[in-house]
Image (tube, grey):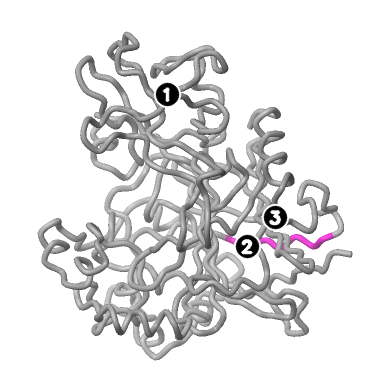
Amino acid sequence: MKKSVLLLAIAALTAGYAVAADPAKIDWTKIKATNIPLFYPGQSSYEWLRSDGHKGGSKEVARGDSCVSCHDEDTAEQDLGNKIVKGGALEPTPIKGKSGYKDLSVQAAYDAKNMYLRYEWKTDNPYPGTEHQYLRFDGKDWKVWGFPKLDKVVQDGKQPGIYEDRMSIIIDDGKVADFGKQGCWLTCHDGQRDMPKQFTKEEVAANPMLTAIKKRDVRKYLPDSRTDPLDWKTGKSVEELAKLKADGKFVDLVQWRAHRSNPVAMADDAYVLEWRLGDAGKDMFGGNSDAQTHAPKFMFDEKKMGFKSITADSQARKGNLFLVREQNAVPFAPNAGWKEGDMIPDYIVSREDAKGSAADNNAMASWNDGKWTVVLVRPLGLTNADDKTLKAGGVYNVGFAVHDDNITTRGHQVSFVKTLGLGSKQKVDIQAVKLK
């Protein structure tokens, strides 16, 4: 990541926002780093774990045993990931060059206001994945250009693989049954995007729950949100879901995004219950495509950037092509002499637009020597209805995931569930240190 962009991000993070410690000045050399092994899970869903395909483990999982009660070898994650990523029953479309295993370094600290998590990992690609999809002019219309590697148009060579790097953490405070034993697998199901028995548009349109919550596909959800935990179609009523949420039967999902949040020094804030839902308010990114014409709403400020758009072979693509409303974006000019191949980012980012519970989380990041270093800043004591309230002395179940190979959905590396303590007296996997 260019130094100038990093400095802008740090400035946005530390100027005018409620952070107690400056995350850029924390002495991380004095805080223990915990290695969290991540592995490629393929299509190993909640349903698969309980099926005959999970030989030797389905009965144990069904009765509530933890994943690590069986997978307790020192090299368990490495062995699993390296096997699954090559292809087979759990990976019908293997991605060339995809790593099956990844080490994630995690350090944790806290003060009176915030929790600070510092992540570091080596990316699959020899460059930072700061690009996301574009809008490309084909001589007549603007169309999306660049898709995740698992999409068929990329596999068929019709589109390039372009997708931002991401770092995710799921947080449970002990209120979600079995999350402390089976972790992220409670959120991953058959029927979702790029999973077995993927939904159809017709099935979604006919589904009472998804229709009620105005969703057009199937994404992460928790088993408690269904009358039959093994069938995504059996959603509970809106009233029942509201009761589950009020009782805290959801998990927090915090995602740092290299394209859609990092330019404004933030991470988005969501939760998982009946779907992967954004917190109340507005996050830091939004679509840049007009709903009617599909043309961009904003373009680069040529006076600041030296160009109003780029092309696929542009030297500018070697930089960090974020369209930030407060910094380098101007309203799109439809009569600016657009040529076939001109491209503009499909998303626009804005810190000023972010508000409410969706804007709780700050972050800063840099990419050097093949590694991302990300520092997430999460406020303590949040009382929002869609957040887990983190407190000094608390212990939380957490799961980690990394996307860093122009890919999304199942194309990540994930951890088995871990425990995170904020100065807790209990034995935990990751112990946050109190800052002086």
**Crowd class of label 1 (few under 14; some 14 to 19; many from 20; radius 10 Å):** many
Looking at the image, residue 148 lies above or below residue 318: below
* SS at mark 1 in the image: strand
Helix, strand or loop at label 2? It is strand
Between circles 3 and 2, the one closer to the viewer is 3
* Residue 419 visible to an observer of this rendering: yes
In the orientation shown, which residue stands out farthest toward the top? 337
Residue at the spot 26% in from the left edge and 25% down from the top edge: 142
**Which image quadrant for residue 347?**
top left
Residue 103 sits above or below residue 348 on the image: below
How dense is the environment of label 3, judged by Cα within 10 Å: few (below 14), some, or many (20 and up)?
A: many
Identified by mark 3, the residue type is: Arg
- Residue receiving disc 3: 118
Q: Are dots 1 and 3 in contact, CB under 8 Å? A: no
Q: In which quarter of the image is residue 10?
A: top right
Residues 81 and 116: in front is 116
Q: How far apart are marks 3 and 2 (CA)?
A: 12 Å
The relative height of residue 372 versus residue 112 in the rendered view (above or below) is above
Q: Mark 1 points at which residue?
A: 299
Classify residue 41 as left or right of residue 22: left
- Category of crowding for the residue at label 2, using alpha-carbon neighbours closer than 10 angstroms: few (below 14), some (14–19), many (at least 20): many
In the image, which residues are magenta?
31-37
Three-letter residue code for mark 1 = Met
Is 36 magenta? The answer is yes
- Residue 246 in the image: x percent, y percent? 44, 82
- State the residue at coordinates (16%, 72%): 208
272 or 91, nearer to the observer = 272
Give the number of the disc on residue 36.
2
Q: Quadrant of the N terminus?
A: top right
Residue at image x 70%, y 75%?
421
